[in-house]
């Protein structure tokens, strides 16, 4: 056992099972079903986290009936056909000593008719916070049927080999809706007094226990959202948990953050602090006598997790995105190798970002996530014939290609033209609150050193030098450059912004490299809707520039909405005094100001500015590709030099190529 994490690797009794450590891979929607059944993608995903050392896995929520269906990838409800398919997963994970739990859910008023094709059911017919729909006030008969559906789903979970179930009350799901005096306006046995508002969960839990017997774990997932007056407070949640504990109705509770009233805190992006759920778990644990308490929400690292356990804040910790990013986090921590853990950067781009678009989830920094069954998990098969590999470019694509090739036994040289690794990804890490990116680049540096990759900085290679190295394989990851044309999606017919070649025009890269000489009043043309514009605005506003952020979109951060980072980002920028100009384009830059057109009204104006910063789409750096192709030198290109995109594409292509060499 690693002495550094002695508390984290203590066993823990949970009803009839003993957890081998305190690390849980908590419930989240991986959205990987095929025809409503878990297939090879789903099996590989969970088996890899069990193999990586997680003590308990809570498999993603299963809707208990049609009214609970929420995503395209939900599993079939009310159908025993799921049992043998889930049995493959539980058997595979049990081989690694992992306790297996299945979450069951019904979000009540906040369902999604587009997926369920059934009216949302709720205690009192409240409106949905998911969309503009209303919900159906459940009759007593419908409540009893829902309770029966929960019990039947728990029975199927038991038949499938699960050791227990976790019920989702979190985020104002149906169980919490019955608990809440604001959501529950009933005047029958299920509403009114505190005890009556507990009746639904009492009957539901009792029905499950009758169905599954004593040797079966039952957990309850709740969340806290202090910024939302409609959400239950920690004091109310403690009162509810104590009432259930006295009746021994469930074995553990897990405390997250956020709700349907403030979705951004459910899966906190990097703008929020670490260990968000720990203080709530600490308050709950102090009140409980027998119930186990789990902390979740932005607990990313073994260090954070061990602190939570050692300080008595919780009995277990749920690390979800951290184990998506590195499925072997637990084993690496246990072995005393925390420096080898690939740390989640809380970007939400490929986990929640893909789930929000109803795709199966993956990970920006671990593209094996969701592809374990195709790529052999997050480990690497040695190459049958080791080669000499030259990687040109030290951005994310080049770093990943070099790392994976070296992991497989190839001899790798990584040549980078500048004096540091990371490329434009590193510049993004210099923006406020994005230090997790520079941490990741430092991780790459450490891994490349361990793998004996020869890293050559300040090395600009030309065609002849590449030929002279006589590498068996050449990988080009030369990235992209700012376009500097000022092309805008709001004016797609106009190739170049008039005046863009004049004075006081800079790129985001110029700003983050500290090469731009900016005046006080800065106009940022945010044409992409991602972090380039807002992150640079944040950086400049903190340096006391007067910043105006202009976009043709209806709101700032269009592409960030799928990561749940757009609202907290806009809030922060407004507090820093950044001015937003939306539904607008720049018609011309004059060196001391810009002509701006409102796309909604056609109105034009010419406000003064000292500097213009372009946050626009880059252009692929293809010069070296063209030279090598002309000289008939074989190479493979990855990342932005193929097409400028975000880091997820670069790391994916680097990983895929490294596996193929």
Image (cartoon, rainbow, N blue to C red):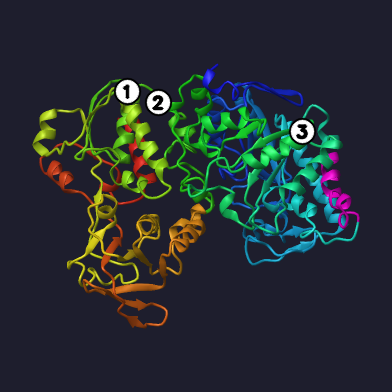
In the rendered image of this protein, does residue 354 appear above or below residue 436?
below
Q: Residue furthest left?
A: 464
**Magenta segment boundaries in residue numbering:** 189-207
Residue receiving disc 3? 291
Q: Name the spot of residue 499 as percent of width and height, x first.
A: 20, 71
Residue at 59% over, 49% down: 266
The mark that comes first in sequence, 2 or 3, is 3
- Label 1 near label 3: C-beta < 8 Å? no
Instruction: Look at mark 1 in the image and give the residue it sits on.
Output: 451
Q: Which residue is mark 2?
A: 380
Which numbered disc covers residue 294? none
Between residue 88 and residue 421, name the one nearer to us: 421
* Quadrant showing the N terminus: top right
Res. 256 image quadrant: top right
Badge 3 marks a residue whose secondary structure is loop
Q: Nearer the viewer, mark 2 or mark 3?
A: 3
> Gap between marks 3 and 1, in whole Å?
46 Å
Q: Taking 228 as reference, is 247 left or right? A: right
Secondary structure under tag 2 reads: loop
The residue shown at (48%, 42%) is 362
């Amino acid at each position: 056992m690693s002495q550094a994490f002695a508390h984290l690797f203590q066993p823990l009794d949970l009803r009839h099972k003993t957890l081998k450590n305190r690390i849980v891979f908590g419930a989240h929607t991986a959205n990987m079903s095929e025809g409503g059944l878990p297939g090879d993608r789903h099996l590989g995903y969970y088996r890899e986290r069990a193999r990586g050392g997680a003590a308990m896995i809570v498999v993603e929520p299963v809707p208990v009936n049609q009214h609970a269906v929420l995503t395209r990838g939900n599993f079939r409800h009310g159908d025993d056909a799921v049992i043998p398919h889930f049995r493959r997963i539980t058997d595979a994970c049990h081989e690694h000593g992992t306790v297996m739990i299945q979450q069951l859910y019904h979000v009540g008023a906040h369902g999604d008719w587009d997926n369920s094709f059934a009216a949302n059911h709720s205690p009192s017919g409240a409106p949905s916070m998911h969309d503009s729909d209303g919900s159906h006030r459940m009759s007593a008969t419908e409540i009893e049927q829902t309770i029966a559906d929960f019990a039947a789903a728990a029975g199927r979970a038991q038949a499938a080999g699960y050791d227990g179930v976790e019920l989702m009350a979190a985020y104002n799901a149906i169980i919490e809706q019955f608990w809440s005096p604001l959501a529950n306006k009933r005047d029958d046995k299920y509403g009114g007094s505190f005890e009556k508002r507990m009746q639904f969960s009492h009957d539901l839990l009792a029905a499950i226990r009758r169905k599954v017997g004593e040797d079966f774990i039952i957990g309850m997932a709740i969340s806290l959202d202090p910024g939302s007056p409609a959400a239950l407070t920690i004091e109310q949640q403690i009162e509810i948990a104590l009432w259930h504990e006295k009746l021994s109705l469930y074995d553990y509770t897990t405390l997250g953050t956020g709700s349907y009233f403030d979705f951004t805190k459910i899966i906190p992006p990097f703008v929020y602090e670490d260990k968000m759920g720990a203080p709530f778990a600490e308050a709950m644990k102090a009140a409980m006598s027998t119930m186990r308490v789990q902390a979740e929400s932005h607990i990313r690292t073994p260090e954070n997790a061990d602190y939570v356990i050692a300080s008595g804040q919780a009995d277990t910790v749920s690390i979800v995105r951290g184990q998506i990013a590195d499925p072997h986090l637990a084993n690496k921590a246990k072995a005393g190798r925390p420096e080898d853990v690939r740390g989640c950067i809380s970007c939400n781009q490929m986990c929640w970002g893909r789930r929000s678009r109803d795709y199966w989830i993956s990970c920006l920094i671990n593209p094996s996530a969701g592809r374990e069954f195709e790529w052999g998990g997050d480990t690497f098969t040695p190459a049958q014939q080791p080669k000499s590999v030259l990687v040109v470019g030290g951005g994310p694509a080049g770093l990943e290609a070099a790392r994976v090739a070296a992991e497989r036994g190839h001899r790798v040289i990584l040549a980078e033209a500048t004096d540091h690794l990371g490329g434009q990804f590193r510049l993004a890490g210099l923006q406020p609150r994005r230090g997790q990116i520079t941490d990741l680049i430092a991780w790459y540096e450490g891994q490349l050193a361990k793998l004996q990759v020869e890293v050559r900085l300040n090395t600009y290679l030309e065609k002849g030098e590449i030929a002279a190295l006589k590498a068996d394989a050449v990988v080009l990851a030369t990235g992209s450059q700012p376009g500097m044309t000022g092309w805008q999606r709001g004016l797609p017919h106009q190739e170049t912004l008039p005046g863009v070649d004049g004075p006081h025009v800079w790129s985001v890269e110029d700003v983050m490299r500290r090469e731009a000489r900016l005046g006080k009043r800065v106009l940022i043309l945010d044409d992409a809707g991602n972090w380039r514009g807002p992150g640079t605005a944040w950086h400049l506003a903190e340096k006391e520039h007067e910043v105006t952020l202009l976009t043709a979109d209806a709101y700032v951060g269009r592409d960030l909405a799928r990561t749940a980072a757009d609202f907290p980002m806009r809030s922060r920028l407004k507090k820093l005094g950044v001015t937003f100009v939306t539904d607008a384009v720049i018609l011309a830059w004059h060196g001391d100001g810009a002509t701006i057109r409102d796309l909604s009204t056609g109105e034009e104006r010419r406000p003064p500015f000292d500097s213009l910063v372009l946050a626009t789409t880059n252009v692929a750096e293809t010069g070296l590709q063209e030279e090598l192709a002309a000289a008939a030198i074989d190479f493979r290109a990855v990342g932005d030099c193929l097409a400028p995109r975000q880091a997820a594409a670069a790391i994916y292509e680097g990983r895929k190529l490294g596996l193929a060499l």
